[in-house]
Amino acid sequence: MPKLGKLGLRVLKIVHLILAGLWVGGAIGLNIMVFLFSSAESGGELYGYNIASKLVDDLLIIPGAMGCLVTGLLFSLFSNWGFFKHRWLAVKWVLTVFCILFGTFYLGPTVNDQPAISYAEGLGALADPTWIANRLTSLKGGAIQVFLILFMVAISVIKPWGLRKKVTS
Ligand code: HEM
């Protein structure tokens, strides 16, 4: 497999970090917004929070997460980092794939379904069992998700645990 040169690796790292920033910032912002929902004072305000949350998910979190995956794949394929040579990188692979699946299939619906409920019911959504369950799932799952993403940032910087096997290249 051909490897990227110094400039290519720098550009890839800059893009990777911007996308990681989108994911981290979007996830923290979304959690804060979901937490604030219960203090909405009108149906319009509640709907505004719900639709803004969905936009943060669609325009920041999803592109950030998929972008990290794609730029991570480029690192693994076209640099000497490889896929599983380093333990910290192997852990990042597992966590990134887990977080994307968790976000898509478990957390995503709790954000996507809210605007329609608050649009139809206004402030009454605050007492709607589906809306309440979605919010709680979003808060609990979102906290786990943010913790795992921040953990990935930390191990990316520290690069702990050494090599999984002796590297010959
Ligand atoms: C499959 C997924 C991923 C792979 C394979 C991957 C791979 C890499 C590699 C090889 C580096 C080192 C680049 C270098 O120093 O030359 C790196 C750096 C970094 N990655 Fe990832 N990454 C992935 C996902 C993520 C995610 C999800 C985040 C956080 C949201 C993230 C945050 C970072 C940060 C902050 C650095 C810079 C560390 C530093 O230089 O101090 N990465 N990544």
Image (cartoon, rainbow, N blue to C red):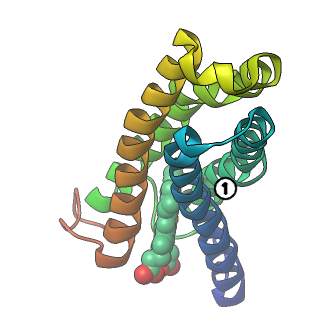
Count of numbered marks: 1
**Residue 11 is at least partly visible in this image:** yes
Seen in the picture, residue 69 relative to 86 is either above or below; the reply is above
Picture residue at 27% right of the left edge, 57% below the top: 87
Percent from the top left, x then y, of residue 79? 56, 69
Q: Mark 1 sits on what residue?
A: 64
Percent from the top left, x then y, of residue 120? 81, 16
Q: Nearer the viewer, residue 59 or 52?
A: 52
Q: Quarter of the image for the N terminus: give it.
A: bottom right
**Residue 80 is at least partly visible in this image:** no
Three-letter amino acid code at the position of disc 1: Gly
Instruction: Name the secondary structure under disc 1.
Output: helix
Q: Nearer the viewer, residue 73 or 47?
A: 47
* Cβ at disc 1 under 8 Å from ligand 1: yes
Q: Residue furthest top?
A: 129
Percent from the top left, x then y, of residue 8? 71, 80
Q: Nearer the viewer, residue 110 or 17?
A: 110
Residue 96 in the figure: left or right of residue 13: left
Seen in the picture, residue 133 relative to 112 is either above or below; the reply is above
Percent from the top left, x then y, of residue 168? 32, 69
Q: Quarter of the image for the C terminus: give it.
A: bottom left
Q: Residue furthest front?
A: 41
- Mark 1 packing: few (<14 Cα in 10 Å), some, or many (20+)? many
Picture residue at 81% right of the left edge, 24% below the top: 119
